Amino acid sequence: MPNLTTKELAALEDQLGFEKALHCKYKGAAQETMEPELKRHFQEYADQHRQNYILLLDYLK
């Protein structure tokens, strides 16, 4: 794990929360829309935010 300050850890914790929330919102939007192109874009955004979340967690290991 990298040597981080308390402020940096708090910022990372906030960012993890943002990434998780955005993943959930886009995933929900993808499930609700009937428009194929929007569904595809929402799913791509959801996948990207999930990947961001995973990368942040991996950084902290």
Image (cartoon, rainbow, N blue to C red):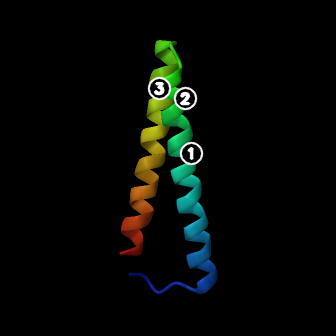
Q: Estimate the x, y position of residue 54 in percent, counting from the top left.
A: 39, 57
The residue labelled by disc 2 is 29
Query: Could you say which quadrant of the image residue 15 lies in?
Result: bottom right
Identify the residue at horizontal 38%, vertical 81% (top origin): 1
Between 25 and 46, the one nearer to me in the picture:
25
Inspect the image, locate mark 3, and give the three-letter code of the amino acid beneath it: Gln
Inspect the image, locate mark 1, and give the three-letter code of the amino acid beneath it: Leu
Badge 1 density bin: few <14, some 14–19, many ≥20, Cα 10 Å: some
Q: Estimate the x, y position of residue 44 in percent, counting from the top left.
A: 44, 33
- Please tell me whether mark 1 sits on a helix, a strand or a loop: helix
- Please tell me whether mark 3 sits on a helix, a strand or a loop: helix
Inspect the image, locate mark 2, and give the three-letter code of the amino acid beneath it: Ala
Front of the two marks 1 and 3:
3
Vertical position of residue 58 compared to residue 41: above or below: below
Q: Distance between the residues labelled 1 and 2?
A: 10 Å
Q: Estimate the x, y position of residue 49 in percent, counting from the top left.
A: 48, 47
Vertical position of residue 5 compared to residue 37: above or below: below
Vertical position of residue 57 compared to residue 30: above or below: below
Identify the residue at horizontal 49%, vertical 27% (top origin): 30
The earlier-in-sequence mark between 1 and 3 is 1
